[in-house]
Image: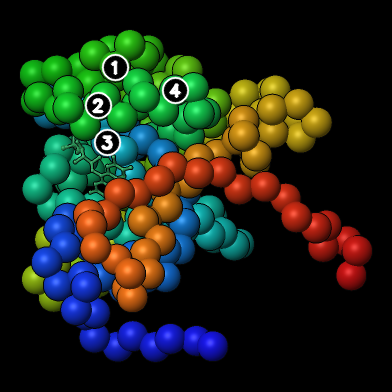
Amino acid sequence: MKRTYGALPETMRDMELYGFNWMEFVVSVPSPLYIMTSYKSNGLPNACMQSWTTFTGGKNGYFAIVSAVSKYGHLYSTLHENGDAVINFMSAELYDRCMSTVKNNGFDTDEIKAAGLTPVKADKVNAPLIDECFMNLECRLRWEKEIAPGDDYVLACLEIVNVHVDERHLDENDLGRTGETGILYNIHHPMDPESFGGTAHDYVGIVKKLRDYAEY
Ligand SMILES: Cc1cc2nc3c(=O)[nH]c(=O)nc-3n(C[C@H](O)[C@H](O)[C@H](O)COP(=O)(O)O)c2cc1C
């Protein structure tokens, strides 16, 4: 039997939503987790954990559709100042260090070095990449839009112009891009409104291959 929710359930009325919509916690659709890096106006590296992004391509290029860039963060300012950034995918053992950038978020801080990681100038764009991350996507801002007028976040379309992938992760029989050694995912607290009574606590997760489409 399915349960249907079209309005905020009573059990979630006092929940701290951190700017999210309550429905996100009821459907809990995972999204890739990464850290976006750019240069602040003082030349120091900025690092911003990001999620809620999809990647799509075609004959006109390959694009990151970043659905929630806070208008009040450094990342938003840096994208406006020079338009360039790098999407860095971290493996599980780098998760804690990458998360530490949320606390070490000062304007006068090199947020990559403060996390014990190594900033390296990207090849094609004016942004730093994180050397230890196994995959780095060099990007240029193409356009941005408010999803709904007056939002605190913008949806940003970034064109990916150069990619770096660690050779052990390119080998699907070695570290690969999925499973425990691959891309991490952000999972909103999957909650049951009928029994929910606490606070939301999100999860970090992984995806794994289930079947090969070639079987069809
Ligand atoms: C797991 C995780 C995912 C996040 N996703 C986003 C996101 O999608 N958009 C966003 O604006 N902030 C997101 N944040 C918050 C920013 O990473 C955080 O506020 C950061 O310190 C802002 O950095 P900045 O001001 O240097 O850009 C996320 C944080 C975490 C821990």
Q: CA distance from mark 3 to mark 1?
A: 12 Å
Q: Nearer the viewer, residue 42 or 136?
A: 136
Q: CA distance from mark 2 to mark 3?
A: 7 Å
Q: Earlier in the sequence, mark 2 or mark 4?
A: 4
Mark 3 C-beta closer than 8 Å to ligand 1: yes
Q: CA distance from mark 1 to mark 2?
A: 6 Å
Q: Earlier in the sequence, mark 1 or mark 4?
A: 4
Q: CA distance from mark 1 to mark 4?
A: 10 Å
Residue 69 lies, with reference to residue 3, above or below; the image says: above
Question: Disc 4 marks which amino acid?
Answer: Leu
Q: Which residue is mark 3?
A: 48
Q: Earlier in the sequence, mark 4 or mark 3?
A: 3
Q: Nearer the viewer, residue 213 or 6?
A: 6
Which disc is residue 101 wearing? 2
Q: Which residue is mark 1?
A: 115
Q: Earlier in the sequence, mark 2 or mark 3?
A: 3
- Mark in front: 4 vs 3: 4
Residues at circles 3 and 1 in contact by the CB criterion of under 8 Å = no
Q: Is residue 188 left or right of residue 21?
A: right
Name the image quarter holding the N terminus.
bottom right
Image-quarter location of ligand 1? top left
Residues at circles 2 and 3 in contact by the CB criterion of under 8 Å = yes
The residue positioned 48% from the left and 34% from the top of the image is: 89
Residues at circles 1 and 2 in contact by the CB criterion of under 8 Å = yes
Residue 27 lies, with reference to residue 154, above or below; the image says: below
Q: Position of residue 116 (x, y in %)?
A: 33, 11
- Mark in front: 2 vs 3: 2
Mark 2 C-beta closer than 8 Å to ligand 1: yes
The residue positioned 31% from the left and 29% from the top of the image is: 99
